[in-house]
Amino acid sequence: MGKARPLSPHLQIYRLPLPAILSITHRMTGVILSTGTLLLAAWMVALAQGPESFAIAMMIVSHPLGQLVLFGYSAALFYHMCNGIRHLNWDRGAGLEIESVYRSGKFVIGAAVILTAALWSLVYFMA
């Protein structure tokens, strides 16, 4: 018999195209935003409950792990927003050619990185 070969393409052989990766990432950022919005609501409840609760919430948010969560939330927000605008453009019937899909995908990634970096630059350098 020879070497056992896989019956179908798998992740070691098949490389997902950029549009597929961006589609999967768009869905993942949607889940992240849903979870992050629950955390945002908890922060607002702490704000409404008074200074003691808010101080605890701010202590959690200012911790390095809390900052990492906020960074991830903002990166997910900007990516999801930029990719959502891209999808709205597709709904109009524009930008559906393969070259345009790849170009707009790279633009979405770049725009999300720039917007996230700009926000966090403002947070750290203006505060």
Image (tube, helix red, strand yellow):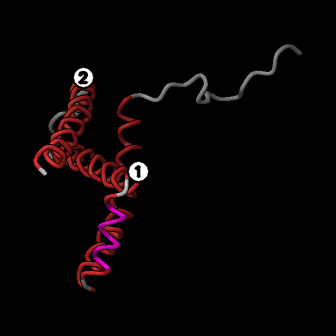
Quarter of image, res 56: bottom left
Residue at image x 40%, y 36%? 20
Left/right of residue 122 with respect to residue 13 in the rendered view? left
Of residues 30 and 123, the one nearer the viewer is 123
Mark 2 is surrounded, within 10 Å at the Cα level, by few (under 14), some (14 to 19) or many (20 or more) other residues, namely few
- Magenta residue span: 53-61
**Where's residue 29, x and y in %?**
36, 51
- Which label's residue is closer to the chain start, 2 or 1? 1
Q: Quadrant of the N terminus?
A: top right
Q: Is residue 2 above or below residue 116?
A: above
Q: Which residue is mark 1?
A: 28
Left/right of residue 3 with respect to residue 52 in the rendered view? right
Q: Is 56 part of what is drawn in magenta?
A: yes
* Residue at the left extreme of this rendering: 126
Of residues 87 and 92, the one nearer the viewer is 87
- Amino acid of disc 2: Glu
- Amino acid of disc 1: Met
Q: Which residue is mark 2?
A: 99
* Residue at the bottom extreme of this rendering: 49
- Residue 41 - label: none
**Where's residue 9, x and y in %?**
61, 27
Quarter of image, res 5: top right
Q: Nearer the viewer, mark 2 or mark 1?
A: 1
Q: Is 80 part of what is drawn in magenta?
A: no
Of residues 121 and 28, the one nearer the viewer is 121
Of helix, strand and loop, which mostly describes the magenta segment? helix
* Residue at the top extreme of this rendering: 2
| Label 1: which secondary element | helix
